[in-house]
Image (cartoon, rainbow, N blue to C red):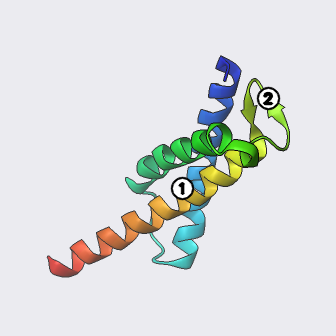
Amino acid sequence: MDTGGIIVLVVGAIAIAFVVDAVASYLTVHRPIGYEVILTMIGALVGGFVASEYLGGISEWGYEYAGLYVFPAAIGAFVVGLLVELAARYAETRYRRRA
């Protein structure tokens, strides 16, 4: 993956993190953006990278830009980002109930 692919991956992870936060906020407790967005960004970045590079034949379809397969990266980033966001929200609500 070239520098252009890394830039696209990072920008996409940031955008997906805010979209996933909005979706999770709609599905669960409505509240302002919190620290979960940072965790979601990291999860989306890792998910996008793994989906684009390490899934074998599954990750080699769709449009390629600078060594980054865009469609598998977007799907992986969204799925992992959503899982991280929901896990962070679940952990936060469990912690608040105990306090």
Q: Amino acid at mark 2?
A: Tyr
Residue 29: give x, y in percent of width and height: 45, 77
Rendered residue at 27%/77% (across/down): 94
Q: Is residue 55 above or below residue 80?
A: above
Label 2: few (<14), some (14–19) or many (≥20) C-alpha neighbours in 10 Å: some
- Helix, strand or loop status at disc 1: helix
Q: Is residue 65 above or below residue 38?
A: above
Residue 16 lies left or right of residue 99; in this view the side is right
The residue tagged 2 is 65
Q: Please identify the quadrant where the N terminus is shown.
A: top right
Rendered residue at 64%/36% (across/down): 53
- How far apart in space, not on screen, are marks 2 and 1 (Cα)? 22 Å
The residue tagged 1 is 81
Q: Is residue 27 above or below residue 40?
A: below
Q: Please identify the quadrant where the C terminus is shown.
A: bottom left
Q: Earlier in the sequence, mark 2 or mark 1?
A: 2
Label 1: few (<14), some (14–19) or many (≥20) C-alpha neighbours in 10 Å: many
Residue 67 lies left or right of residue 28; in this view the side is right
Rendered residue at 56%/47% (across/down): 47
